[in-house]
Amino acid sequence: MDHFTLIDGELHCEAVPLARIAAEVGTPVYVYSAATLRRHARAFRDGLKPAGRVHVAYAIKANPNIAVLNVLAREGYGADVVSGGELARALAAGMAAQDVVFSGVGKTRAELTKGLEAGIGQFNIELEEEGVVLAQLAAATGRTARAVLRVNPDVDAGTHAKISTGKRENKFGVPIDEAAAIFARLAGLDGLDLRGVAIHIGSQLLDLAPLETAYTRIGALVAELRAAGHTITHVDLGGGLGVNYKAGDVPPDLADFGAMVARVTKDWDVTLMFEPGRVIAGNAGVLMTEVIWVKPGVTNPYVIVDAAMNDLARPALYDAWHDFAAVRPNGARMTANIAGPVCETGDTFARDREIDAVRSGDLAIFRTAGAYGATMASTYNSRPLVPEVLVDGDRYAVVADRIAAETILAAERVPDWL
Ligand SMILES: *Cc1c(COP(=O)(O)O)cnc(C)c1O
């Protein structure tokens, strides 16, 4: 559910006509709906009411814009960060350090130190050596790092291979059959308060079954750790819930998710932590673009738009689908390919797809681009860095500037010895 709807035949974001944003900010541009972010943040939390003590840390990597983080901070959300840069963003957006979880398989010593100095709520340790180093860094400065051990439960999330994270051969977490022994070795270290375990099996999950399997395995591990005398107070169940990118996608219902969590975890007696990203931000954003040309093709024409793979990488990266819609649809339809200006065949958003009929100069949107969209943008082909706009009711603001190709060029230099 989102707030990008037709009003009097014209697409709006909440009460703001998208054409007005295009006229004032230009295209391509990401447009986010604050009301949609809030709705999703509340729906996720409400769904988990039956599950008892819950802490929600929004996975910043999905959409790290500081205004987006600000909306979610006001909803009481903490942050799941995966780099020192994301940690700085979370704090700058007003999220409390104690509500920050630091995940990621390659945290550097400098980043661990940054987290310790900020006093973050939890480190999710991905390998034994990281836990040892974190304990040393903490103990050396008289601190105690609150931490959980990320476990790889060896579950196939049934999603795209590039965003599966919970299979044994993936780089994340410690193998579940070694987890108890590693936990025991780390739990005794000075400087470390190892209080639980974590999992995150992948992203864009449309089926609850793999999550239930993973949660059940982690529940058995919690029982095993307790039987060995460890105190377990926190279990981080990660993120991963999918969203509907196209008609026919049926993402998990949040009430069903909450009921499943409540059922599987009912005897755990822990604080449950969640790290949702896509399910909060995905449907809250669109990428607006202008049609440059409609070029004849072999079977179907190419709609060449001014957005490209450097602005929205998901189709090129994951063969992802984003619905395409005209901002002022005239009712006619056409079958076309949709592509950007970048000089790669991979810069194709859709092939042989039935879409709203568009012509040169028309505005259109790619829907469900609020997560893993602008944050993956680059300046490939020396294109500007795409700007972002946040709408709230009848107001809107540019929340990230378009960074001109000239500005990026100005940061480069030819050495004087050349
Ligand atoms: C990416 C990631 C998330 C968020 O995943 P979504 O599919 O966007 O919900 C949560 N936790 C960790 C550790 C991640 O790497």
Image (spheres, rainbow, N blue to C red):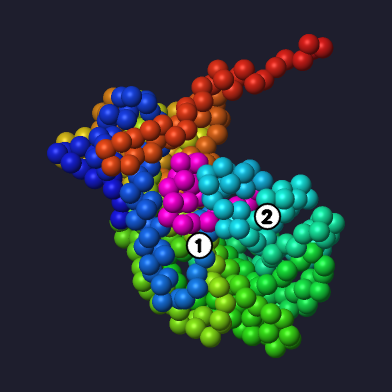
Front residue of 144 and 160: 144
Residue 193 sits in quarter:
bottom right
Tell me the mark number nearer the camera, choosing from 1 and 2.
2
- Vertical placement of residue 284 versus 231, above or below: above
Q: Nearer the viewer, residue 262 or 99?
A: 99
In front of the other: 94 or 187: 94
Residue 324 quadrant: top left
Q: Residue at x 51, y 80 (%)?
A: 265
Rounded to the nearest whole Å, what is the CA distance between mark 1 and mark 2?
A: 18 Å
Q: Is residue 152 left or right of residue 338?
A: right
**Residue 366 visible, this angle:** no
Depth order, front residue of 322/64: 64
Q: Secondary structure at mark 2?
A: loop
Image mark for residue 238: none
Residue positioned 54% across, 67% down in the render: 273
Q: Residue at x 72, y 50 (%)?
A: 117
Residue 274 lies, in percent from the top left, at 52, 65
Q: Which residues are magenta?
A: 61-83
Q: Residues within 10 Å of mark 2 (few under 14, many from 20)?
A: some
Inspect the magenta stretch and tell me whether residue 96 lies in it.
no
Q: Is residue 83 visible?
A: yes
Residue 105, image x, y percentages: 69, 57
Is 402 situated above or below 208? above
User: Circle 2 sits on which residue?
Assistant: 119
Q: Which residue is mark 1?
A: 56
Label 1: element kind:
strand
Mark 1 surroundings within 10 Å by alpha-carbon count, few (fewer than 14), some (14 through 19), many (20 or more)? many
Q: Quadrant of residue 339?
A: top left
